[in-house]
Amino acid sequence: MSTQHLPARALELIRIFQEKLILELKVFFFTMQEFFWFSTRAFVAIPKAKRYWRDVLDQAKICGADSLPIVMVSAISIGALLAIEVGNLLEDFGAKTMLGRSTSISVIRELGPLLMGLMLSARFGSRNGAELGAMQISEQIDALRAFGTDPIAKLVTPRLVAALIMFLPLTALSDFAGLHSAAYMAEHYHRLDPGIFWNSVYPRLAPRDFVVGFLKAPVFAIIITLVSCFNGFSAKGGTAGVGRSTIKGIVVSSGLVLIANFFVSKLVLENM
Amino acid sequence: MIELRKVSLKYGDREILKNISLTIKDNAIKAILGPSGVGKSTILKLMLGLIKPNSGQIIVDGTDITSMTETSLYAIRRKMGMVFQGNALFDSMTISENLGFFLRENMKLPEKEVNRRVTEQIQFAGLEGYEEQLPESLSGGMRRRVAIGRAMIFKPHMILFDEPTAGLDPVSSKKILSLISSLRNDNNLGAVIVTHIIDDVFNVADSVAVLYKGEIIFDDSTEKLHKATHPFIRSILSDKILEL
């Protein structure tokens, strides 16, 4: 190949790359626009949720009661692990009495809500994506529209309302389980008196610690529900398409949960 | 009456419908015949406003639905019942719940009236004893009859059928076709049937439009189809089932 041809080939490759990039950007912005309208319609339909109160209750059971075991298991294991690791570190500095303080802040501000968000993204989000994706593929969503029912009000808003209601108590239970497992490990692994542990927890917890933690619950509820439902509604291409849209829903909502976790903490801690 | 006036539709670069015009009269059965994947089901979705055309007008009972919003389309859609190709029954609901769903959802009828209509459709479809079964436990023909009952239950002016006999055995197909004929003869309803099976057209339709490569190449009574000279129509008349 002569060297004279190289610039022409390089220019051609750049042109192809540019075209692909522009196409991808167009698809991205179109999807964002669609997602914005989808989310707006889900929120606007909230007053209609009382009409679908049975669906709200069903979804509350799915994302609340049915999700409790996995949320508790993850909270207990991370609380216990945190107590062991942080306790070992504090022991080197002779500050083991601060174990309650450090674990409670970590659990209440960050790990309790974050783990709950990730677990629910996997459990509740995947269920939404797969169920709605299957409904989309089998034309059940088109059937709702064809017979004069708003599918977003019927299928998405009850899930959103249920998640907004249930994520708060789940966060509280996740914090409770995480803290108690940390206290248990502090007593039985680090031989720390429970009185010392709890004395470093309660008097030192500030309102902002709870605001940071509990503000994340509704933010995660909105992200997980809307992203998973939107991907379910966008499913196409048969059963493989349902799989793709479900995975996309979990990956995107988990990523957004991690990003939102950072920004909510930053926002509250800088302003309170 | 439903009218499509110079309707065109594209998916990306692919031209699905090219400037097609169709008129569907009340109290008559119109068939839309064409090979698979040619855009026949798309025409039904256009009539319901489920998708929007790139150009042209769709007129339902004198109202142009082309630029109507989703919310205002609901009233138009209730004039038509749709039987989807895969039936689109709600798989988490029983047969009677499927039948009564839209009455409870949109028409706010008293529960007694809902139950009366559900029983009426169960009898019409010959599904007595299956009221509390889930759709998955029924045969293909039974599910199709439930889907027809669901489309009829709120007494629309017209019913749209997407491949009503596709995937059914000959006995079930015959039952479905006689059910469709009875809509016009006994219930005075109009119907649009999208199909790739030419025998279905001759069995139930009053008129037929043939869709080929995105264009309507024939639109007249079923009797006149035999006299059509278009090579594609001549070929389908000899082969009967379109596998192109």
Image (cartoon, helix red, strand yellow):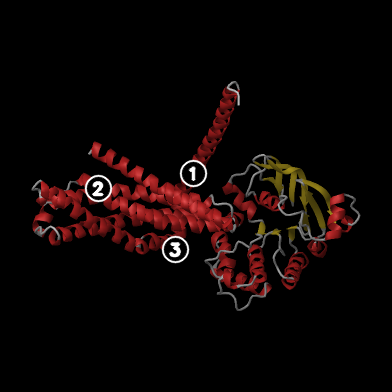
Q: Is residue A13 above or below residue A175?
A: above
Q: Which mark is residue A35?
A: 1
Residue located beneath label 2 in the image: A109
Q: Is residue A69 left or right of residue B11?
A: left
Q: CA distance from mark 2 to mark 3?
A: 33 Å
Label 2 resides on the chain identified as A
Q: Nearer the viewer, residue A73 or B23?
A: A73
Secondary structure state at the residue bearing disc 2 = helix
- Earlier sequence position, callout 2 versus callout 3: 3
Instruction: Residue A254: give x, y in percent of width and height.
Output: 39, 49
Residue located beneath label 3 in the image: A54
Instruction: Residue B112: give x, y in percent of width and height.
Output: 56, 71
Q: Is residue B27 visible?
A: yes
Label 1 resides on the chain identified as A
The answer to whether the residues at label 3 and label 1 have Cβ atoms under 8 Å apart is no
Q: CA distance from mark 3 to mark 1?
A: 26 Å
Residue found at x 60% / y 20% = A4
Instruction: Residue A204: give x, y in percent of width and height.
Output: 13, 48
Give neighbour class at mark 3: few <14, some 14-19, many 20+ (Cα, 10 Å). Answer: few
Specify whether disc 2 shares its chain with disc 3: yes
Residue that extends furthest to the front in the rendered view of this protein: A1
- Earlier sequence position, callout 1 versus callout 2: 1
Q: Which mark is residue A261?
A: none
Q: State which quadrant residue B25 falls in.
A: bottom right
Secondary structure state at the residue bearing disc 1 = helix
Give neighbour class at mark 2: few <14, some 14-19, many 20+ (Cα, 10 Å). Answer: many
Q: Is residue A150 visible?
A: no
Label 3 resides on the chain identified as A
